Image (spheres, helix red, strand yellow):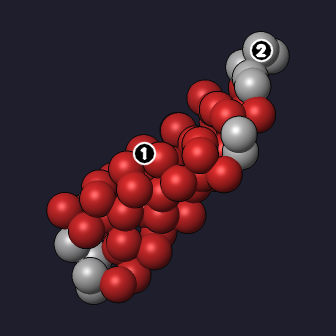
């Protein structure tokens, strides 16, 4: 399960960084999602639900901070 989550996080980073028309808010959302997902994973001891909630929350916070 951990390898699947890391693969998904890596794919999100690559897709987020590869777009030539990325805006600052999009980069903030991607970075926040990755950090939030990693934090949620660590806090909940590897729970998939914790990782997802952390990623969604982190993406929202990252997007708002990038404005």
Label 1 residue SS: helix
Give the quadrant of the N terminus: bottom left
Residue drawn at point x = 53 percent, y = 54 percent: 61
Mark 2 closeness class: few <14, some 14–19, many ≥20 residues within 10 Å: few
Is residue 23 shown left or right of residue 37? Answer: right
Q: Which residue is mark 1?
A: 8
Mark whose residue sits in front, 2 or 1:
2
Image coords of residue 17 (percent x, y): 72, 33
- Label for residue 21? 2
Image coords of residue 51 (percent x, y): 32, 63
Pick the front one: 54 or 12: 54
Is residue 12 shown left or right of residue 4? Answer: right
Circles 2 and 1 in contact, beta carbons < 8 Å? no
Where 59 sits versus 1, above or below? Answer: above
Number of marks drawn: 2
Residue drawn at point x = 19 percent, y = 62 percent: 49
Which residue lies most toward the top here? 21
- Label for residue 35? none
Where 52 sits versus 43, above or below? Answer: above
Is residue 4 shown left or right of residue 24? Answer: left
Where 42 sits versus 10, above or below? Answer: below
Image coords of residue 21 (percent x, y): 77, 14
Can residue 6 be seen by looking at this rendering?
no
Label 2 residue SS: loop
Can residue 45 be seen by looking at this rendering?
yes
Tell me the distance, in whole angstroms, between the alpha carbons under discs 2 and 1. Answer: 22 Å
N-terminal-most mark, 2 or 1: 1
Where 36 sits versus 42, above or below? Answer: above
Residue drawn at point x = 64 percent, y = 32 percent: 26
Residue drawn at point x = 45 percent, y = 74 percent: 39
């Amino acid at each position: 399960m951990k390898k699947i989550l890391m693969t998904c996080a890596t794919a999100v980073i690559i897709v987020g960084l590869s777009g030539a028309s990325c805006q600052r808010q999009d980069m903030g959302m991607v970075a926040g999602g990755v950090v939030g997902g990693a934090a949620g994973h660590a806090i909940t001891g590897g729970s998939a639900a914790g990782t997802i909630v952390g990623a969604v929350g982190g993406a929202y916070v990252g997007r708002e901070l990038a404005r």
